[in-house]
Image (cartoon, rainbow, N blue to C red):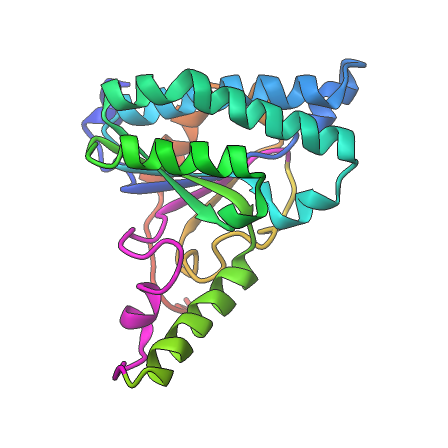
Amino acid sequence: MSDLESSKLPTHVAIIMDGNGRWARKRNLPRVEGHSKGIERAKEIVSTTLELKIPYLTLYAFSRENWQRPKEEIQALLGLLEGYLDREVEEMKERGIRLKVIGRISDFPDRIRRKLRKAMLYTSTNRDLLLSLALSYSGREEILTAVRRIIRKKSRGISIRVNEESFRDFLYTGGIPDPDLLIRTSGEMRISNFLLWQIAYTELYITETLWPDFGREEYLEALAEYRRRERRFGMICE
């Protein structure tokens, strides 16, 4: 830990939390048990991120494609999300964590939408860690939504010079720096429609570890691996 604290850490870590279902299946448990264990791991990673004073953490919690899962699993996931909000928001407030949701909040039931918006408002003045939860999220939809926002403004006669810097302000992540490090658990070698615009130059860390087994020590190893790399921007051939 001391070595990490004295070294250059990423400003923004993004994580694709994959493998909850496989973790449960390997143990002959219902899939919801994997998701429940995954929430425990998320809390551990959030705490470690806060401890290391990394200011931005984005967790891919629920994709738009997840709505296609069996109804029983979706209801279980929604129940876990609601329980997480009920239990953790007060602690977020006390620990200086600001909650932000990126994705289509409108896809969720009214009760959960209200709780998400209340949690974001309640923690909005916190500054120690911005925790972004990607919920009902699609990277392609995010880009299309940004384009639609620009078109609407132009249709109202608002002059906008569209370039990379101005475009990023229309994304769900407007005002947030791009991730320096993207971690994906479970060994899958794909991005899964996550932060497609933002990760153009992000360092990738892929691990075979399933998300419910991805604890503090492996997170620290991922950060140490990031520290050992020489970041390069653009195409460099040697």
For the residue pair 143 and 154, the one nearer the viewer reads as 154
Q: Residue at x 36, y 53 (%)?
A: 173
Q: Quadrant of the N terminus?
A: top left
Q: Residue at x 45, y 19 (%)?
A: 86
Can residue 127 be seen? yes
Magenta stretch: includes residue 90: no
User: Which region is colored magenta?
Assistant: 158-186
Query: Residue 4: x and y, percent?
Result: 27, 26
Q: Residue at x 51, y 17 (%)?
A: 40
Secondary structure mainly formed by the magenta segment: loop
Would you say 210 lies left or right of 61 here? right
- Rendering quarter of residue 114: top left
Instruction: Reply above or below: 139 against 76.
Output: below
Magenta stretch: includes residue 171: yes
Would you say 146 lies left or right of 96 here? right
Query: Residue 95: x and y, percent?
Result: 25, 20
User: How many tags in the picture?
Assistant: 0
Query: Residue 207: x and y, percent?
Result: 57, 34
Instruction: Reply above or below: 16 against 30.
Output: below
